[in-house]
Image (tube, rainbow, N blue to C red):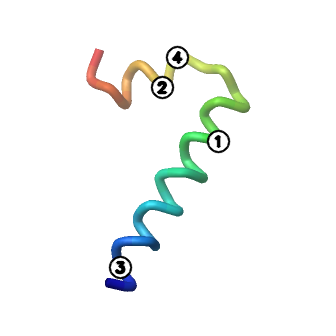
Amino acid sequence: MNGIPSIKIEIDVDNKLETNKSSPTVHKTNGN
C-alpha cells in the first residue's frame, strides 16, 4: 500500500510543475 501514495504524490508534483509552467506539455501528457 506504500507504493500507491508514492505514485499519487509523484503525479501531484508533476501536475503542479506543469501547471506552474502553463506549457502545452499538459496536453501532450493527456495524449492530445
The residue that mark 1 highlights is 16
The residue that mark 4 highlights is 24
- Kindly identify the amino acid type of the residue bearing the numbered disc 4: Pro
- Kindly identify the amino acid type of the residue bearing the numbered disc 2: Val
Q: For the N terminus, which image quadrant? A: bottom left
Residue 26, which numbered label? 2
Q: Earlier in the sequence, mark 3 or mark 1?
A: 3
Q: Earlier in the sequence, mark 1 or mark 2?
A: 1
**Does the residue at mark 2 contact the one at mark 4 (Cβ under 8 Å)?**
yes
Mark 1 → mark 4, Cα distance in angstroms: 14 Å
Q: Residues within 10 Å of mark 4 (few under 14, many from 20)?
A: few
Q: Earlier in the sequence, mark 1 or mark 4?
A: 1
The residue that mark 3 highlights is 3
Q: Is 8 situated above or below 15?
A: below
Identify the residue shown where x is 48% and y is 25%: 26
- Kindly identify the amino acid type of the residue bearing the numbered disc 1: Lys
Hey, which quadrant is residue 8 in on the image?
A: bottom left
Q: Nearer the viewer, mark 1 or mark 4?
A: 1
| Residue at the limit of the structure toward the right, as seen here | 20
